[in-house]
Amino acid sequence: MPAQPPVFDLLGVGFGPSNLALAVAVTEYNATAAKADVVTAHFLERQEGFGWHRGMLIDDATMQVSFLKDLVTLRNPNSSFSFLSYLHHKDRLLDFVNHKNLFPLRVEFHDYFEWAAERVDDLVSYGHEVVAVRPVVEDGVVAYFDVVSRVAGGEPEVRRARNLVLATGLRAHLPEGVRATERVWHNSEFLHRVRALSDPRRLVVVGAGQSGAEVAAHLHERFPDAEVCAVFARYGYSPADDSSFANRIFDPAAVDDYFQAPEQVKRALMAYHGNTNYAVVDNDLIAELYRRVYREKVLGAQRLRLLNVSKLAELVDTPDGVRVTVESLTSGEREVLDADAVVFATGYREADPTALLGELAAKCLRDAGERLRVGRDYRLGTTDDVLGGIYLQGGTEHTHGISSSLLSNTAVRVGEILQSVLHHRAPAVPAQHEYAVSALS
């Protein structure tokens, strides 16, 4: 009889910031738990090391959220895994304080994530792509999940778990009919691809959000002899609403409000506050781009062209580059541009979290709109014969609101997931650990 694999209390698929924060929460809980109450956890990540949007780690790009919305602070302000602890470790705390800035450089925050990931690397297997999840049936019910992963060139490995946490991230989105090539990229690959450009004459950027604006600004600065054409349907870049009251949409309490709201109220809230996150740009970057456009008009040498109220109508690969046809949405007039490269900053889409679940997907409950049913604790609704928990980090915007896949609520969200795992563990959480659990909520 083959040996049974060890059973983890929690197994995470994907190891971006969300599951990294969960690994930290588990580590902190276990540090004070009795031996019998320790949560055994492991995480599988297909990348060879920790990485988060590496293709957009532009040197001068800043975070759009406060440093206090790090991996832990809103859950546990005393944590040694906080961004402030990281700064202290790097001997930059006073420098950061003197900087008087709530928004660190993106490269710095990524370094913070890597620093935290190194401290919990015993919980992670990198280079493991999850290829299947199989139900383990005992006495007529799904008692466990077997997660099958594969290292490149290696044999499949199986790990068994009582609970799964799926954090498979977002998928880069290209418009219908557009195919990525050596000269046509999604901005998620931007820094990896731009290094190959040599003395370009013209570059085209499609998209009016933060990433599109950052890419246009970077290309304009990096290639001083190239024309940079930004194409978008709006009249201009729209500013992000980061005012104090509007930012409450990202608060943990707002998740409660959204979750219990009727469907029509959910739709209204998304419509009211979509401009806090979607297709919007920081005011400082908008002002900088406007300064550049105006300066070039004064000098009579326009390199940064904003082709507004327009769409990309045609894209053709040529031996020397890409031929782009831009069409005015108002007049229908077309302009043909020969470009060395085209960058699509056209956003991301949520991946189907059930794609890996195989036959288990049929046991996941859906609402009238065929959307997954998700509990307030981020646990998927399943048929009664599934005992284990399947939790989602991402893919819950329809139930939990705009902060579903954002950093703003990550620290609190992982505490709620861990608390749910503990709550469902038989028979109950011992009294001596009630404080540890409540601190995670």
Image (cartoon, rainbow, N blue to C red):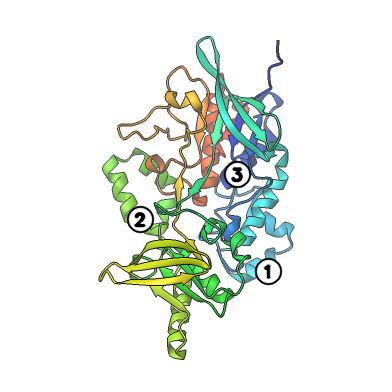
* 377 lies left or right of 78: left
Of tags 2 and 1, the one toward the viewer is: 2
> 276 or 348, which lies in front?
348
Name the secondary structure under disc 1: helix
Report the amino acid beneath label 1: Asp
Report the amino acid beneath label 3: Ala
Report the amino acid beneath label 2: His
How packed is label 3: few (under 14 Cα within 10 Å), some, or many (20 or more)? many
Decide: marks 1, 3 in contact (CB < 8 A)?
A: no
Which residue position holds label 2? Answer: 273
Q: Position of residue 123 (x, y in %)?
A: 69, 37
Quarter of the picture containing the N terminus is: top right
| Quarter location, residue 384 | top left
> 54 or 31, which lies in front?
54
Q: Is residue 135 above or below residue 274?
A: above
**Mark 3 vs 2, N-terminal side:** 3
Q: Position of residue 376 (x, y in %)?
A: 43, 35
Which residue position holds label 3? Answer: 21
Residue located farthest toward the front when viewing the structure as drawn: 319
Give the number of the disc on residue 33: none
Q: Which residue appears at 44% of the width and 89% of the height?
A: 300
**Mark 1 vs 3, N-terminal side:** 3
Q: Which residue appears at 67% of the width and 56% of the height?
A: 111
> 396 or 185, which lies in front?
185
Q: Which residue appears at 46% of the width and 75% of the height?
A: 289
Which residue position holds label 1? Answer: 95
Q: CA distance from mark 1 to mark 3?
A: 26 Å
**Mark 2 vs 1, N-terminal side:** 1
| Quarter location, residue 432 | top right
Q: Position of residue 229 (x, y in %)?
A: 45, 72
Q: Position of residue 32 (x, y in %)?
A: 68, 34
